[in-house]
Image (cartoon, helix red, strand yellow):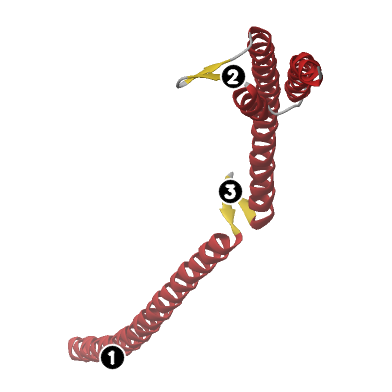
Amino acid sequence: MKLLKYLLVLPLLLFFFEKTYAQENNISVDSALQQEKIEGQFDIVIKKSGKFQEYKVVKLIWLNKLKSNTVDTIKTLESKLNTSNLKITEQKSTITELEESLAKTNDNLSTITLEKDSISFFGIALTKSSYKTMMWVIIGILLGLLGFFIYKFKNSNSITLEARKALDETEAEFEDHRRRALEREQKVMRKLQDEINKQRKTGTK
């Protein structure tokens, strides 16, 4: 009698334990399918699935849920990727604008520095060092020309003095010659007058 009771109770217990195990199995898989990481969901589904020879028997409801979660995860990743791409594009645009602004600022700074360090000479922008060099070259040329003209002036002055000296000597010689010629003329005139007087005296006799 007791054996019969045990035989009747045993199937009921086995059915109860199997149902309880199945519920626990379903709860653990359902709970796993609610977690965030898709990799863990695959691991739990594979682990909790039944086995037939070398195959795994997966419940269709688990497979559909896993598919839905995978699609949602992919969509989320795509959305994050698109958002990241938009941010990257915005950042690139901002970087480009900043680079252009920096280049413009550098150009303005270079222009200001050039204007500060340059001097306009006959409409030509020259750096201060180039301007100083050119000024010293011009001063050197002017000093050279001044020295050349001073030399020419002294040379001309020396020639003028020599010419004046020669002229004075010539004038002195001319004056001496004129004086001698005048003296000779006076002597000749006196001789001529004496001869005339002599002829007159002879004619009177």
Inspect the image, locate mark 2, and give the three-letter code of the amino acid beneath it: Gly
Inspect the image, locate mark 3, and give the three-letter code of the amino acid beneath it: Ala
Inspect the image, locate mark 1, and give the three-letter code of the amino acid beneath it: Arg
- Residue 50: give its label: 2
Please state if 140 lies on the left or on the right of 100 as rendered. left
Please state if 201 lies on the left or on the right of 150 as rendered. left
Residue 169 in the image: state x and y as whole percent.
33, 88
Q: Which residue is located at x 20 percent, y 89 percent?
A: 195
Q: Which residue is located at x 69 percent, y 16 percent?
A: 69
Please state if 20 lies on the left or on the right of 97 as rendered. right
Residue 199 in the image: state x and y as whole percent.
19, 87
Q: Disc 2 or disc 3, which is closer to the eye?
A: 2
Q: Secondary structure at mark 3?
A: strand
Q: Give how far apart the Cα atoms at labels 2 and 3 are.
A: 89 Å
Q: Secondary structure at mark 2?
A: strand
Where on the picture, by quarter, is residue 81?
top right
Q: Give how far apart the Cα atoms at labels 3 and 1 are.
A: 77 Å
Among the two numbered marks 3 and 1 on one chain, the one whose residue lies closer to the N terminus: 3
Residue at the extreme front? 1
Q: Which residue is nearer to you in this view: 178 or 69?
A: 69
Q: Give how far apart the Cα atoms at labels 2 and 1 are.
A: 164 Å
Residue designated by label 3: 125
Residue 74 in the image: state x and y as whole percent.
64, 18
Q: Are marks 2 and 1 in contact (CB under 8 Å)?
A: no
Q: Disc 2 or disc 1, which is closer to the eye?
A: 2
Q: Is residue 16 above or below residue 40?
A: above
- Residue 180: give its label: 1
- Around disc 3, counting alpha carbons within 10 Å, would you say few (fewer than 14), some (14 to 19), or many (20 or more)? some
Q: Which residue is nearer to you in this view: 55 or 196?
A: 55
Q: Which residue is located at x 66 percent, y 15 percent?
A: 66
Residue 111 in the image: state x and y as whole percent.
65, 46
User: Where is the C terminus found, in terms of image quarters?
Assistant: bottom left
